[in-house]
Image (cartoon, rainbow, N blue to C red):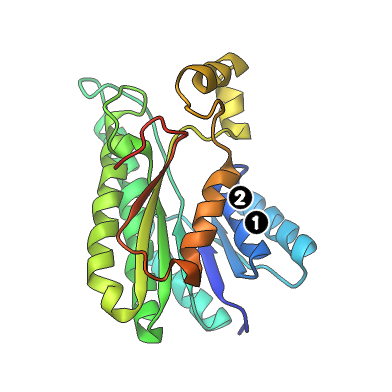
Amino acid sequence: MTDRSVAVVTAAGGAGIGAAIARRLASDGFDVVVTDIHERRGQEFARELSEAHGGEFLYLPLDVTDTEAVQRQVGEIVDRKGSIDVLVNNAGWSKIEPVAEMSIETWQRCLDVDLTGTFACMRYVLPHMIERGRGSIVNISSIAAYETSREHGAAYSAAKAGVLALTRVAAAENGQFGVRVNAITPGLIYNDFLRKIYPDEFFDGYAQDRSLVGRVGRPEDVASLVSFLASEEAGYITGEVYGISGGVYPHG
């Protein structure tokens, strides 16, 4: 058991948005549970948090497409920590293929991770939040949910649009129980993974030609908003979608 509020972050072990969110929530005083499908990466990151903030931060392996595993791990977190106060659904997967050429496997995998995985985590966390009469869920979607573009691929765009609908309905259903549900739609967020895929000229061009603030996003930009939405300062906010795109696509 812990005397701190507990935050669960999916896909938190990488070098991007999930890790930045986990670091920020740990700095805010949350007892952060790191979940990630990559065990070595997740374990190393949990140790990093422990060294930076003191105490022991828990890592649990989690494949969000395995609904039985999601149910089991949520139960273990509640048994070991006593509660789940904040859930951040950050796990995602994408493969860009034109609709006329897309395999069923690509379509299904994208929906399984990005949409059904988000649903599964909410499905098994929500009863615990409802029982306690409080909680905050933040779903990481994407500007792909509403941008008319070939950049993101239809499967990813459809899944992330589904996340927005899921967010709004869950907010409507659960506000009466003290549970808030919101979503964030990041634009281009620079991280080490993307840096390996795209040349520096890609990011420079995006910053110059598309971003209204002259730079691309940073994982910490998303983490700051999650921090606010997870806090009591956001107690009157639910069912909302917040863009973080440097003005590239400022509305949902």
Residue type pointed to by label 1: Arg
Residue 243 left/right relative to 56: left
Judge left or right: residue 38 versus residue 181: right
Q: Element type at marker 1?
A: helix
Which residue is pictured at 63% across the width and 66% down the height? Answer: 28
Above or below for 108 versus 95 = below
Which quadrant does the N terminus fall into? Answer: bottom right
Q: Nearer the viewer, residue 224 or 70?
A: 224
123, 64: nearer the viewer: 123
In the rendered image, residue 21, in percent from the top left (x then y), is placed at 57, 54
* Displayed quadrant of residue 149: top left
Q: Is residue 45 left or right of residue 125?
A: right
**Which quadrant does the C terminus fall into?**
top left
Residue 12 percent coordinates (x, y): 57, 53
C-alpha gap between disc 2 and disc 1: 5 Å
Helix, strand or loop for disc 2: helix
- Type of the residue with mark 2: Ala
Residue shown at the point (32%, 40%) measured from the top left: 251
Quadrant location of residue 190? top right
Q: Is residue 9 visible?
A: no
Where residue 23 is drawn, which disc sits there? 1
Quadrant in which residue 16 is drawn: top right
- Pointer 2 and pointer 1: residues touching (CB < 8 Å)? yes
Residue at x-position 56% and y-position 21%: 203
Count of numbered circles on the image: 2
Q: Which mark is residue 153?
A: none
Q: Which residue is mark 2?
A: 20
Of 83 and 189, the residue lying toward us: 189
- Image x and y of residue 239, in percent: 30, 60
Q: Residue furthest left?
A: 100
Q: Is residue 193 something that shows in the picture?
A: yes
